Each structure stands twice: as structure tokens, then as C-alpha cells.
Amino acid sequence: MKLSPPVACLFMATLITACQSSEKSETSKAAFQLITLDPGHFHAALVQKSMYEGVDSVVHVYAPDGPDLQLHLDKIQGYNTRPDNPTHWKEEVYKGADFFDKMIAGKKGNVVVMAGNNRLKTDYIQKTVDAGFNVLADKPMVINASNFDKLKESFTTAEKKNVLLYDIMTERYEISTMLQRAFSQQLDVFGTLEKGTPGNPAVTKESVHHFYKNVSGSILTRPAWFMDVAQQGEGIVDVTTHLVDLVQWECFPEQAIDYQKDISLTSARRWTTDMSLSQFKAITKQNTFPDYLKKDVVKDSILRVYSNGEINYQLRGIHAKVSVTWAYKAPEGAGDTHYSIMRGTKANLIIRQGAAQQYKPTLYIESVAGNKTLEASLKAALPKIQQEFPGVDIKKIATGWEVVIPEKYKEGHEAHFGRVAQKYFDYLKAGKLPAWEVPNMIAKYYTTTQALELAKKSN
């Protein structure tokens, strides 16, 4: 059928109006509109590796122009164009030195994602919450003790403004850790948590990370400032955030921690990872050390980064130790590793992730000396575990039992960002966080920032 010009024009106008109306309708259904603030870390992109129901596909990005921003946009574009399950994000970008003020004034969304340079993050959190935005922040929210009170005030402000401030704790979604927590709550299997000693803690968590890293199929380009502890934060306040969080989350599940009463530091230490200029070039694509790093460069052009740390402390009288180590590059075929033990009166729950486990986290249950009923207790408890984790099983090995985890549960670290984001959106829909989350975030950052202070005095 051929339309006359006037009729064709009317038809096209009607079609355009209908499309615009459809787009408005889709947007109006979205309860949440994301804003990304200065995405200097690849974690900002990982939040958008999936689409979410009720979240607008248009994301407003505010950042200074530069390589950090471009790397972020390239990753989003990669998710949008991947052959399997592509996303359909639309990035609306503002570039400029006044990016933060523009974001606050523009009010183009209601959820601000922060994952980047940590030097000003605590200030950004405080001002963003005060302006009435919800904030989903990558760890760490604070990197020094001098800003701890500012973070505390931000949680108080968030409650007054009826917005939610939350950090991205991906490790709670790692299946071996989830199962370690689940088995620790089976009293006939685990017993009760030992008190431990400084030399033999009840809970130990150790992680090894690498500067040279493969993410989403390519070698990660790290910003030069990632190696500056004044901007990224020392290792003892960075990755240890996850480990301290897991100690609280596993030992005292869904219980509020009072940092003033429940936490006592025993000792803390920090040490450097040394990096040559050629190694620095490989991960940053920069030919020289920037001026702000020269304070950390020693003879023969070796950059010394305080990326390693260890904390010994007591949590409600339970002795715990957490430590993080950064090597430059993993051995061939290896990757980041995690070791964790929870010592119970009847059994120990141990996660190992070394060569013997093909660098995949594996949970073991080992009997405490004198406990001859563990096998029967495990078989009795397994149906309870399987109610929450169908398909999980155990198998006898020389040292005890290995927990057999179906492949469907073995998501990669990148997928956990979507899990955290979805949980956060669920909290936003409910209008509140669980009662224990805020005091436990405060307790966590008190532990890490005070440990840094102690470690500096000990050096």
C-alpha cells in the first residue's frame, strides 16, 4: 500500500510518538537510575556486566577525561557487543574537571556507583549521601584512620536522608566460603568456634593477589595511581577489607558488631612489593614513573608498594588473623589464591586453593583429635546443607572429607559483582539494609584503619 505524502508524514509522526512514548514508559518503569562516578577501577564496569530488572539502561557517567574513563567505556561496550547474552547499556558521559559538582547538581539518577581512586572516596561518599543519593561503593570506603569518623557520619546522614550506603563485598558469594559458613553453623559437625591464641588463631584468612592480571579475556591495564598507596590505599586497608568482612560474616552471622566493645587489635604489620620499571610499563602502558610515585622509587628504578599487610586481632574474644600479599604475576596456570581456616571444637573447616586444588577454592572438613563421631554427624547434617545448596555432597579422603561442589555454583569472581548489585537493589526496594549491616561496615573499617596505624608504629 502506498501512502500519500500527508498521510505518510502523519503515519511517521504517529510512529515516532509511539516509540518515544514506549521509551518513556520503559524508563518510567525503572525504579533505579545508575550514575557512575569517576570509574578508575575495572570493578565499576563489572557492576554492569549484567542487566537488572527495574534498573534503567541509561547510565550517566561523570569523570575527568582520560584513559581511566576510556577503559571503563570500552569494557561496557564489550559487554554490549559480546555474542552471548549482550547487555544494552547506554552511557551518557560528562567529561570535565568539575565532574563531581555536575553530578550533584544534575541529579540524573538515584544510585551512584563508586569504584576508582580512593584518595577522595570518603569525601565523595559523604557529599553524595548528603545530597540524597544512594551509594554503592567498591571497597575500601576509607583508607586511613583520619577519615574514619567522616565515614561514620555518612552512615548517620544516610539514615536521615533515607538512602542506602553499601559496599561491594563480593567474597560473600564465593561458594566455598558460603559452605564454610553453612557447615560452621552445624553444631554436631563443627562444635563451637575455638577462642584461639595470637599464635594459633581460631580463624585465619589469607589471600594472594597479582598486579599482572587477566580480566574479561584480556590483560588488565592498571592506572599508575593504583600503585600509589596515597590514592589506592595500602594493602592492609584495601583487600583485607574483604577478609575482615568474612570473619565477621562467618563467625557471627547476622549479628551486629560494636567496634568499640567487640574489637581489640593485637598486632599488625605491613611490607612492600617491589616492581621494576619494565614491569610497571607492562601493566600501566606508561614509560616512566609519574612524579607522585617517585617518593616510593629506590635505586635502580625499583618501585616499592606497601601492598601487603597482616592483622592479628580479637573479635568478641575470638583470635583472628587476616593477611594479604600482592605478587607481581602468578606462576603459569595459577591465579589469585585464598586460604581460610575456621577451627571448631569438633572439626576444622579449611579452604585451600593451591596447586593441589588446581588453583580452585576447595573446602575440606577435618576432624579434631578425639572426635570419632564426625562421619555420622556429617551424614546427618548434609540434608540440611542440601536444602540451601542442592547437589552439594561430601567425599572421604585421607585427611578427612572434601566438600563436593557442583559446577553450577562455581561462578567466577566477576559474576559476584552482579550478585552484590542485585542484593543491593533488593535492599533498595525494601527501603532498608539488614539491621546488622551498617554497624558491621563501621566495625570492619575501624579494624582496617586502626591496623594501619598500628602497623606504621611497628615498622
Image (cartoon, rainbow, N blue to C red):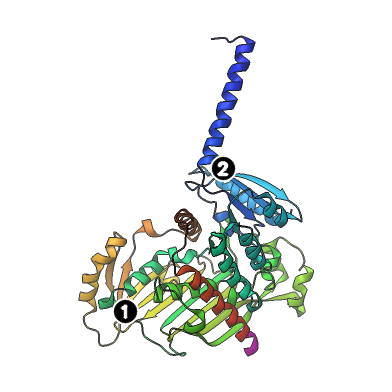
- Classed neighbour count for the residue bearing mark 1: other residues with Cα under 10 Å, few (<14), some (14–19), many (≥20): many
- What segment carries the magenta color? 455-459
Q: Position of residue 36 (x, y in %)?
A: 62, 54
Query: What is the x, y in percent for residue 192?
Result: 32, 81
Side of 396 relative to 221 (left or right): left
Height in image: 44 above or below 352?
above
Kind of element beneath mark 1: strand
- Among all residues in the image, which is located at the extreme right? 291
Quadrant where the image shows the C terminus: bottom right
Q: Please tell me which of labels 2 and 1 falls first in the chain.
A: 2
Where does label 1 land, which residue?
Answer: 366
- Residue 366 in sight: yes
Instruction: Find residue 430 and report its horizontal and vertical position in percent.
Output: 44, 56
Q: Which residue is mark 2?
A: 81
- Magenta residue check for 457: yes
Who's the residue at 28% across and 77% down the image? 187
